[in-house]
Amino acid sequence: MNIHPIFVHFPIALLTLYAVLEIAIPLKIKFYKLCKWDRPESSPRLAKLYQLLITPVWNYIKAFLVIVGTVLALPTLQTGEWAEEKYMSYASDYTTFAQSEVGQLIELHSTFATTTVIVFAILAIAYLLRLLPSLISLPQSVQAVSTKIQSIVLNAYIAPLLALLGIIAVTITGALGGAIAHGADTDPVVQMIYSLFF
């Protein structure tokens, strides 16, 4: 029995929502400033919305989404590996099957799934390092390294860029998974992504 589909959807939802927030909030803040909607005299209602956008609560929400999404992606990745092994075990000649289009599709799906987890894991670790000092006391040297990692990864440009790479990777992974489960003609997105590789 293939249990991979049971695990796959929830981490995708969490990581997609995280990526949308990581990309959209800074863009919206810049747009509000550009339009001068961040000032109460221009529009009190829009200024209140701007104040909501700049509250620190979003950092906790993003941290929760990316950390939990990444942790839940690990068993998803493992169940995918089990499904791949089971699928490959049905082939009478492993080498021929691995070189076939289906074998290559499965391997490419696996590669993009691993890439997705790595990209989001980098962000999750950075957010975890940001939260850690409020939970436990860290030695000064560890705190210095932690701060350096946070300043690099959670930079105003790097975090949204990694989130964008993550959402691209998860989209390609999902489309290739859809092609494995339902065929390459499932929908236009799956067809387009499938045609990029095959």
Image (spheres, rainbow, N blue to C red):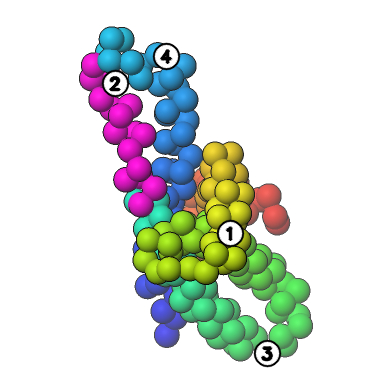
Compute the Cα span from label 4 to label 3.
64 Å
Residue indicated by mark 4: 35
The three-letter amino acid code for the residue at tag 3 is Ser
53 relative to 159 in the view: left or right: left
In magenta stretch: residue 57: yes
In the rendered structure, find residue 47 and report the number of the disc placed on it: 2
The numbered mark, 1 or 2, whose residue comes first in the sequence reads 2
Residue indicated by mark 3: 92
Q: Which residue is nearer to you in this view: 188 or 5?
A: 5
List x then y, in percent, for residue 8.
43, 67
Q: Residue at x 29, y 21 (%)?
A: 47
Look at discs 1 and 3 and give the one toward the viewer. 1
Q: What secondary structure is found at the residue carrying circle 3?
A: loop
* Residues marked 4 and 1 touching at CB (< 8 Å): no
Characterize the local packing of mark 1: few (<14), some (14-19) or many (20 or more) Cα atoms within 10 angstroms: few
Give the overall secondary structure of the magenta segment.
helix
Characterize the local packing of mark 2: few (<14), some (14-19) or many (20 or more) Cα atoms within 10 angstroms: some
Q: Residue at x 72, y 77 (%)?
A: 98
Spot the residue most to the left.
Answer: 45
> Is residue 193 depicted above or below 98 in this figure?
above
Q: Which residue is nearer to you in this view: 17 or 1?
A: 17
- Is residue 14 visible in the rendered image? The answer is no
Compute the Cα span from label 4 to label 1.
38 Å
List x then y, in percent, for residue 178.
50, 61
Q: What secondary structure is found at the residue carrying circle 4?
A: loop
Q: Quadrant of the N terminus?
A: bottom left
